[in-house]
Amino acid sequence: MMNVELSNWVPIQKEEYVLSVKEKEEIFKRGAVISIKHGYIFEPVLSVIQKTEGECVYFRIPEEFLKNNVFKGDLVSCQVMQGEYEYIINGIISEFEVTYPWLVEVTIKSVSRVKNNRNAKRYLTNFQSRFYTKGSDTGIYAIIKNISMTGVGAVFREEIKPQSLVNVFVSASIDKIQSLEFKAKINRIINREIYNEYGLEIVEIDEINKDKLDKLIYRLECNEAEFVSNSLK
């Protein structure tokens, strides 16, 4: 059965997995970044696991929960990456702590795991970009939702066939004048009601842009480390 999961937004095969208490403590450990999907929130939101007790995982409440009226009893899907697997929690919000450090308690109903076949870590982003297909001078406006050293995930309304090659220009605040540029191949497409989600593999990039991408990934890694440090209380 095909599924669409959290930060990746790509079709995958997943398997149900029963975790022992020890495995839960090791996988959903304090300091692990957790990506949370809620039906009221358009995009996954990130938080950091503070603790795991029995069948419950605790993380700092994301601001988006407050903005989008998330309540006790709501269903959530959470993703944690550990080692060679991505673990997906299907759970229910069972409590909120309204005093500092403002934790959300999620009771685990089931856990699935997915083999992480990517050879590079991806980072959630919201970068503006333009895609140019062969023979077209009119660029397609797209938003880069995640990026790695080997590929990107993007959303836009236009349709491009799988395996098509596109020239990509990304505005990622690396250089105020020049964009990050590379050629990519469309590997995956998911049709939504008002837009399409694409998974692209970088197939050609010159040394100048490779250096820009290296710097961008380093900056995103530092941002994540700072996010974890600031979130642990």
Image: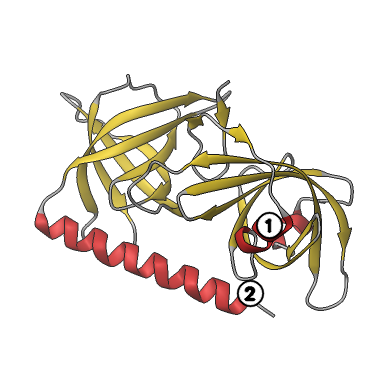
Query: Can I make out residue 175 in this image?
Result: no
Secondary structure, mark 1, is helix
Residue 38, image x, y percentages? 72, 44
Taking the spot 57% from the left edge, 43% from the top edge, the residue there is 6
Q: Mark 1: which amino acid? A: Lys
Real-space Cα separation, disc 1 to disc 2, in angstroms: 20 Å
Q: Mark 2: which amino acid? A: Ser
In this view, the residue in front, 107 or 151, is 107
Taking the spot 37% from the left edge, 44% from the top edge, the residue there is 118
Q: Earlier in the sequence, mark 1 or mark 2?
A: 1
Q: Is residue 203 above or below residue 100?
A: above
Q: Is residue 226 above or below residue 61?
A: below
In this view, the residue in front, 23 or 189, is 23
Residue 138, image x, y percentages? 25, 30
Residue labelled with disc 2: 231
The answer to whether residue 52 is left or right of residue 28 is right
> Which residue lies most toward the left here?
207
Residue 148, image x, y percentages? 34, 52
Q: Residues within 10 Å of mark 1 (few under 14, many from 20)?
A: some
